[in-house]
Amino acid sequence: MMKKLLLFVLDGLGDRPNPMLNGETPLQAAYRPNLNALVSSGLGGLMYPVRKGLVCGSDTSHLSLLGYDPEAVYTGRGPFEAMGLGIIAEPGDIAFRANFATRSREGIIVDRRAGRDIPESGSLSKKISFTMKGTQFIVREGVEHRAALVVRGKGLSPEISDSDPHEQGRPAMKVKPLSNDAEHTADILNEYLDRIRDILDTSPENMDRESRGKPPANELLLRGAGITPRLEPFNKRYGLNGACLAGIPLITGIGNLAGLHLLKHPGATGRVDTDYRGKVREAVRALDVHDFVLVNIKAPDIAGHDGDPLLKRDVIEKIDDAMGQVIGISDDTVICVTGDHSTPCTTKEHSGDPVPILFSGNGMRRNGVRHFDEVSCGYSGFDLLSGDVMTMMLQLSDKLEKYGA
Ligand code: ZN
Ligand code: ZN
């Protein structure tokens, strides 16, 4: 019987001692009988995302967890920013991070953020998304003035300069080719930017903003061009039919690039009110038809960014409760639970602290860890890098071929 692989990534799980929790981490403070049972029946340790001490984003860490070397395939934030905003980027797409900005009549960028508050950014984004000369331009709005632009077409190169002057009081820059094969890309982008300046200048949204004394969002500043990487398909690399269940589009986008089957669960919201039990149930059910399932649960990261240790403890308790459903399936499944990075409530940002990891399954060795948390898992002395997780899971499921004779 082939063992199945189930990988839970609790986003931003790792934390630091918190004064509001008597010096414990949210994970230590949480009532977590199921996570403790899982680690007790297997291995507990610490995992460093990508490299020891590196402060990782969710994108680089998830790529690495799936066994892709981010240093080889991560070509800039643009494509991942776009995926995070819900554009399913395809390999070869050029993507930018973008800002709505305010340009004066003289063509000077007078506000790089167009006053930050742009409720019209969604409708403006739709108006400046179109196909021109066989090249498709897709804009998606983000928080406040932020947006992403994806350019899809033939013969495109990411080797072009920013249009963002990176400071106010100067005009937007012409996009310049930085290599010989990027001329077409620079030309078509400059033409696109000219075209959308007209559209933005004359849009009812901006007329209305101006009439209310608000700075018009009449310029789209582009920076950080990157090409969406082509990843070796997961099923080819591992011989496993894989699936991905995530509530946030960034992770769904990465799953899509890896060729994972994208599972949908209507209750998976990517927020703290997500349907934890339903999501775990859906993942377990997906193992009937898939060999590998990646589940991302975003909530701990959100609580970490909010600097709310009580909320983080509470969402971990909900996750633990939902995990009760996987206790019984470890006979024919290798289960791994970890985080993609730490998001300490004390700093409200990602940190380079390692995250706890557990492997659980029938017939596995145990290493004596009884509690699933940053400290208890550290005592075992077992540590690994995120890039080793797939190898570990394959080994524990007896799927690895022998290295040597
Ligand atoms: Zn993350
Ligand atoms: Zn985060």
Image: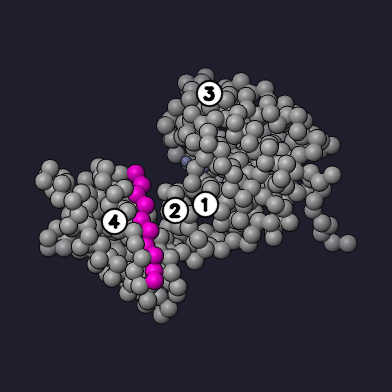
Magenta region? 134-143
> How far, Cα to Cα, is label 1 from label 3?
28 Å
Left or right, 265 with reference to 240? left
Magenta stretch encompasses residue 321: no
Residue at image x 67%, y 33%?
A: 377
How many neighbours does mark 3 have within 10 angstroms: few (below 14), some (14-19), or many (20 or more)? Answer: some
Q: Are marks 2 and 1 in contact (CB under 8 Å)?
A: yes
Magenta stretch encompasses residue 141: yes
Give SS at disc 1.
Answer: helix
Residue at image x 56%, y 54%?
A: 256
Give the numbered dot on residue 253.
Answer: 1
Which mark sits nearer the N-terminus, 4 or 1?
4
> How far, Cα to Cα, is label 2 from label 1?
8 Å
Residue at image x 66%, y 44%?
A: 293
How many neighbours does mark 4 have within 10 angstroms: few (below 14), some (14-19), or many (20 or more)? Answer: some
Relative height, residue 104 to residue 277 (above, below): below
Which mark sits nearer the N-terminus, 1 or 3?
1
Which mark sits nearer the N-terminus, 3 or 2?
2
Mark 3 against mark 2, which lies toward the viewer? 2
Give the image location of residue 197, x and y in percent. 22, 62
Relative height, residue 195 to residue 268 (above, below): below
Give SS at disc 4.
Answer: helix
Give the image location of residue 92, x and y in percent. 49, 66
Q: What secondary structure do most residues of the magenta stretch adopt?
A: strand
Q: Amino acid at mark 4?
A: Lys
How many neighbours does mark 1 have within 10 angstroms: few (below 14), some (14-19), or many (20 or more)? Answer: many
Q: Are marks 2 and 4 in contact (CB under 8 Å)?
A: no
Give the numbered dot on residue 314.
Answer: 3
Task: Write down the residue under mark 2.
Answer: 87
